[in-house]
Image (cartoon, rainbow, N blue to C red):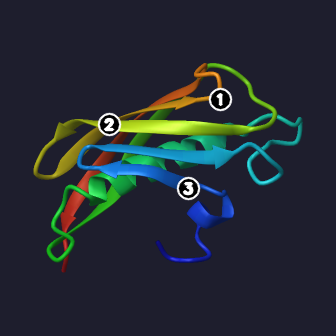
Amino acid sequence: MKKQTLVENLGIHFLEVEKGAIIATMPVDERTIQPFGYLHGGASVALAETVASYGAAQLIDPAKEICFGLEINANHIRAKQDGQVTATAEVLHHGKSTMVWDVKIRDEEGQLICVSRCTIAVVPKK
């Protein structure tokens, strides 16, 4: 991973990286909360797209292809004020030009915080 990116700035850490499955954590702290002191929905979406994109990158030929987030949706289920969240992502569809990833973000007790689906575009490198 490159330094000084959104991933580093949000404190995202990858725990497991497998073909078709990714697990990463993100702190709920001053970097990821909104002004009222709760986990920012945008931080959850950034975590979801990060794990989906990184997972997709494990399934392409990096010499010939590159991948980008194409579409993302998220439902914020529960608020969180501190601690950390864990995103678990798995590929639902792995096509030639798109992938669809399911991402669930949970707290330390396993309670669902956010559920997201991310479509990734796979593009030939120029």
Residue annotated with mark 2? 90
Check the image and report above or below for 90 versus 121: above
* Kind of element beneath mark 3: strand
Residue annotated with mark 1? 108
Q: Please give the name of the residue rendered at 43% of the width and 40% of the height, measured from the top-left corner.
A: 72
Determine which quarter of the picture holds residue 10: bottom right
Determine which quarter of the picture holds residue 53: bottom left
Label 2 and label 1: CA atoms lie apart by 20 Å
Residue 57 x %, y %:
29, 60
Residue annotated with mark 3? 13
The disc, 3 or 2, on the residue closer to the chain's N-terminal end is: 3
Q: Nearer the viewer, residue 69 or 51?
A: 51
Q: Tell whether 25 sits left or right of 72.
A: right
Check the image and report above or below for 58 versus 1: above
* Kind of element beneath mark 1: loop
- The answer to whether mark 3 and mark 1 are in CB contact below 8 A is no
Report the amino acid beneath label 2.
Glu
Q: Please give the name of the residue rendered at 56% of the width and 38% of the height, measured from the top-left corner.
A: 86
Q: Nearer the viewer, residue 49 or 89?
A: 89
Q: Please give the name of the residue rendered at 74% of the width and 48% of the height, measured from the top-left corner.
A: 32
Residue 69 at least partly seen: no
Label 3 and label 1: CA atoms lie apart by 15 Å
The disc, 3 or 1, on the residue closer to the chain's N-terminal end is: 3
Q: Residues within 10 Å of mark 2 (few under 14, many from 20)?
A: many
Q: Tell whether 20 sits left or right of 85.
A: left
